[in-house]
C-alpha cells in the first residue's frame, strides 16, 4: 500500500470520527442545558460556492454545460459539559443544465470541512449528489442534510466560536480560477 493510500485511509477514518456520532443532533437539542456559547459558523466558501462547466473554457452561454450553486447553509448545534459539539447542516443547492450539457443526469461533488476558525482544516469529507433533470427543465433545486457532525473540544470552556463548518464544490483548477476571476457567462441580448 502506498504512503498516499495510507494517508487517505487515515484521513477517512479521522473524518468518520468527526462527522458521525452515537447521538443525533435532534436528541442533543432536546437536552435542557443551554450551550455554553454560540455554534460554529456554517458557510459556503466564496471561491467554491458555484461550479460552471465550460466547453473549451470559452465564457459564452452556448458553451455552458452543467452548473451548480450553493444558495444557503444552515446549522443547528448542541454542546454542554465536556461533550463535543454536535452539529447538523442543511445546504440548499440550485443546479442548472446549459446548452452544452450532455445527458439529463449529473453527479456533483461537494465538501464539508471543519476548521479551527481562520486556521487549519481539522477534517474534510466529500459527498456526491446526483441530479436528474426532468424533460424540459433546466433547473433543479435540492436541500441536502448532513447529520451529526461531531467536533471535539479541548475542555468544557471551549465554545463553538472557535470553529467553522465550510461547504463548497470540488472544483478543477480551471473552475476555481473562473470563480476567482469573478467572471460570469453572459447571454447575448439586444442589438449588435
Image: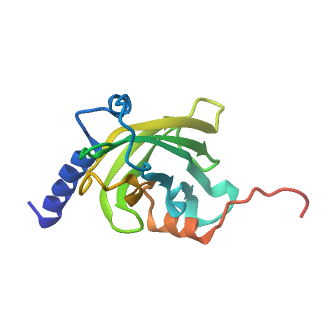
Percent coordinates x, y for residue 20 in the rendering: 26, 40
What colour scheme was applied to this rendering of the protein?
rainbow
State the quadrant of the N terminus. Answer: bottom left
Percent coordinates x, y for residue 112 in the rendering: 39, 51
Residues 123 and 82: in front is 82
Numbered label tally? 0
User: Extreme right residue here?
Assistant: 191
Rendered view: 141 above or below 108: above
User: Extreme left residue here?
Assistant: 1
User: In the drawing, does residue 114 fall left or right of residue 21?
Assistant: right
Percent coordinates x, y for residue 140 in the rendering: 59, 36
User: In the drawing, does residue 167 fall left or right of residue 8?
Assistant: right
State which quadrant residue 180 falls in: bottom right
Residues 106 and 155: in front is 155
User: In the drawing, does residue 18 fall left or right of residue 173?
Assistant: left
Residues 93 and 113: in front is 113
State which quadrant residue 46 falls in: bottom right
State which quadrant residue 97 falls in: top right
Percent coordinates x, y for residue 192 in the rendering: 89, 64
- Residue at 52% x, 40% y is 103
Amino acid at each position: 500500500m502506498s504512503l498516499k493510500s495510507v494517508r487517505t485511509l487515515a484521513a477517512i477514518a479521522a473524518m468518520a470520527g468527526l462527522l458521525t456520532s452515537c447521538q443525533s443532533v435532534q436528541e442533543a437539542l432536546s437536552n435542557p442545558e443551554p450551550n455554553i456559547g454560540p455554534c460554529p459558523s456554517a458557510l459556503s466558501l466564496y471561491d467554491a460556492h458555484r461550479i460552471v462547466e465550460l466547453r473549451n473554457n470559452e465564457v459564452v452561454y452556448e458553451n455552458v454545460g452543467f452548473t451548480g450553486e450553493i444558495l444557503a447553509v444552515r446549522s443547528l448545534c448542541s454542546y454542554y459539559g465536556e461533550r463535543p459539539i454536535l452539529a447538523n447542516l442543511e445546504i440548499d443547492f440550485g443546479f442548472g443544465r446549459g446548452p452544452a450539457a450532455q445527458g439529463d443526469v449529473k453527479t456533483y461533488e461537494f465538501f464539508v470541512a471543519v476548521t479551527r476558525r481562520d486556521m487549519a482544516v481539522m477534517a474534510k469529507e466529500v459527498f456526491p449528489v446526483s441530479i436528474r433533470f426532468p424533460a424540459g427543465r433546466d433547473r433543479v433545486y435540492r436541500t441536502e442534510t448532513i447529520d451529526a457532525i461531531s467536533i471535539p473540544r479541548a475542555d468544557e470552556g471551549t465554545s463553538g466560536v472557535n470553529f467553522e463548518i465550510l461547504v463548497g464544490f470540488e472544483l478543477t483548477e480551471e473552475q476555481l480560477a473562473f470563480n476567482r476571476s469573478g467572471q460570469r457567462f453572459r447571454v447575448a441580448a439586444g442589438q449588435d
